[in-house]
Amino acid sequence: MDRFEWEKKLTGQGIATLIGIDEAGRGPLAGPVVAAAIHFPAIWYEKGLPDSLHAVHDSKQVGALRRQKLYKELTQHPQVRCRIAEVDAPIIDQINILKATHKAMSMTTENWEEPVPEHALVDGLPVKGLQCPHTALVKGDARSFSVAAASILAKVHRDHIMLQWDAMYPVYGFARHKGYATVEHRRAILEHGPCPIHRRTFLGKLLAPNQTTFTWDGSNS
């Protein structure tokens, strides 16, 4: 599979500046949803990625240590441009996770220096409200290097955030599960109640039948 196939196709149609967009954190019970956008120089579409980036793949297929290394390479490479955006739990609760994900993705298309992106390759389905034209690719992180690189940026950035929250709220084990609904995490919520970064709209199945809400006073953190 040529994982620059779509990049070549779109630049062949006259699009000069193309970005890949992906997200991380749609499913967890806590923390933000994070989106990332990345632009590679067009010459790479023909010549391939540089050696330092050959391991770029869907973030779920890359080990944690390698993701960290690739994140550093991508964010510090002089020929790579990228943007990362977050939408926090309170906003997710207000507008729902799909709209929050689309909001984060849209935020990544803002405030680019010239040349601004003309088109985006987006993982999954079309994104409502995205500020530039885009092509939605189901399993795009396995089909496009641009989308795969964005998935790595989003995943590692979100993991860093969850490590910071773990230091503030250690009883939940955020450093281990990153907010996902593991047995450990669900037990901690039932024992301690939620903390400020929990998504209240995601916790319904954890509530006791006679319990309509959780409260938080910070005493268990």
Image (cartoon, helix red, strand yellow):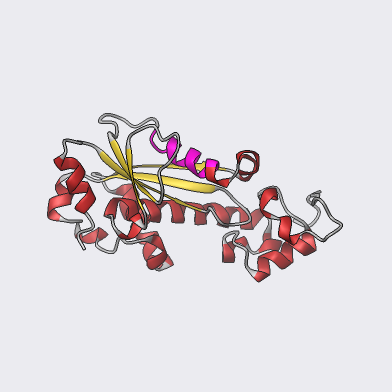
Residue 134 appears left or right of 159: left
Reply above or below: 114 against 71: above
* 108 falls in the magenta region: yes
Quarter of the image for the C terminus: give it.
Answer: bottom right
Image coords of residue 133 (percent x, y): 32, 35
Question: Horizontally, is 124 left or right of 80 in the view?
Answer: right
Residue 139 position by quadrant: bottom left
Please say whether residue 78 is one of the residues in the magenta stretch. no
Question: x and y percent of residue 170 in the render?
Answer: 68, 60
Residue at x 44%, y 51% (from the top left corner): 154
| Total numbered badges shown on the rendered structure | 0
Horizontal side of 43 relative to 134 (left or right) equals left
Which residues, given as a range, are shown in magenta?
A: 99-109
Secondary structure mostly seen in the magenta stretch: helix
Q: Quadrant of residue 107?
A: top left
Q: Residue at x 53, y 45 (%)?
A: 98
The answer, for residue 73, to whether it is visible in the render is yes
